Amino acid sequence: MTSLEDLPIRDDLRGRTPYGAPQQAVPVALNVNENTHPIPEDVAHDIVARVAAAILHLNRYPDREFSELRGALARYLGHGLGIDRIWAANGSNEVLQHILQAFGGPGRAALGFAPTYSMYGLLASGTGTAWVTAGRDDDFELGPETAVAAVREHDPDVVLLCAPNNPTGTPLSLETISAVADAARGIVVVDEAYFEFADPGTPSALTLLEGRPRLIVSRTMSKAFAFAGARVGYLAADPVVIDALRLVRLPYHLSALTQAAALGALAHADEMLAMVDEIRAQRDRISTELANLGFRPYRSGSNFVLFGGVDDPAAVFEALLERGILIRDVGLPGCLRVTAGTEAETTAFLEALAAVASSAENRIAT
Ligand SMILES: *Cc1c(COP(=O)(O)O)cnc(C)c1O
């Protein structure tokens, strides 16, 4: 058998491991921050009708500029954004890849604040961009002084700000974002994958776009929008940034089926997002109950909670899995991460964790 090492693979990819969140069929999957509520059936029927209509034209390439979809995304985002400021791709991972292809690359560096979204480093390596990380303040917060000091020290070509941050859930203030945008020479990306789960009234970095042509705000339909399987991510930025991304995208990168499905979901945005308040309530319930159990939940503006005070994260992860509950060991010492599910899923998780924590082998740290 040939091994990877025997292939003439790029030197900078040798020894790397692919993105690998476990995919397992379990009754309660709370590991990758999906919206665990299914798509409402009437919305599903409308999406099917739209996809069915698109199928009749699959002999032709799709609209390369996906103008109708960009229009719908612009309307959804509001903030007076026109379609010339919108871009989309197959998941915000591809959106981020486009950004790094256009603004990163060999001889260039991207900066992030660890611990942060594991895909940033992988997307950087795939595009030949150096990946540099700086630290955070206490409790994974990121204040303007710490962020700006790292930007000054590393002078990156691209800064990736995850707001709120995955895997910690930490919200990021507009103060930090605007300070980074002012200090950075390069592109500043604000990844708002979980923005819809922020407490009502929380301002988006979209409010900072005007007059900042190097600032990009990315979003996804994978989380609050309950559309992870469709693969649709998007961003808002200056029209010139969009022109830069056109240079690196593959022609017709968004299939006619994806465009039709996304338009169907966006036409029912209110219904698709109806469960967000409920998910936020389950998140807050998780934080309260984890604290009651003696764990240490971190502040979350997302649909998941990172909690510390776990003596043996790997053992607790396995014990929960034996009970049919899949959460995430993100590799942070003493910590685990759980997605807020339906009320029933959340109850199953909390009850199983209480049982696991009280059993002798997995006694929690005090
Ligand atoms: C889940 C997630 C995304 C979304 O990825 P998609 O490719 O849109 O599914 C982006 N950024 C962060 C931080 C995430 O956690």
Image (cartoon, rainbow, N blue to C red):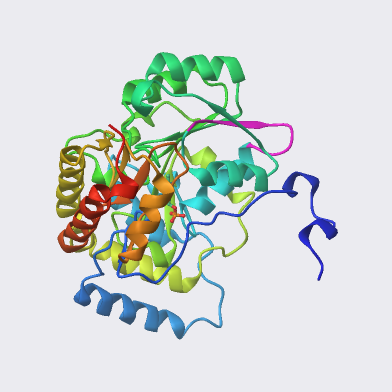
The reply to whether the magenta stretch includes residue 113 is: yes
Nearer-the-camera pick, 56 or 139: 139
Residue 199's spot in the image, x, y percent? 19, 38
Q: Is residue 169 visible?
A: yes
Q: Extreme bottom residue here?
A: 56
Q: Is residue 124 above or below residue 9?
A: above
Q: Residue at x 62, y 59 (%)?
A: 250
Image-based side of 118 in relation to 296, left or right? right
Q: Is residue 326 visible?
A: no
The quadrant holding residue 265 is bottom left
Image-based side of 124 in relation to 22, left or right? right
Q: Which residues are magenta?
A: 104-114
Q: Extreme front residue here?
A: 360
Q: Is residue 148 above or below residue 244?
A: above
Q: How many marks?
A: 0
Nearer-the-camera pick, 352 or 288: 352
Q: Residue at x 30, y 40 (%)?
A: 364
The reply to whether the magenta stretch includes residue 297 is: no
Nearer-the-camera pick, 149 or 260: 149
The quadrant holding residue 351 is bottom left
Q: Residue at x 21, y 42 (%)?
A: 290
Residue 113's spot in the image, x, y percent? 48, 29
Image-based side of 28 in relation to 215, left or right? left
> Looking at the rendering, in which quadrant would you find the C terminus?
top left
Residue 84's spot in the image, x, y percent? 44, 46
> Looking at the rendering, in which quadrant would you find the N terminus?
bottom right
Residue 353's spot in the image, x, y percent? 25, 52
Q: Residue at x 53, y 19 (%)?
A: 151
Nearer-the-camera pick, 159 or 139: 139
The quadrant holding residue 226 is bottom left
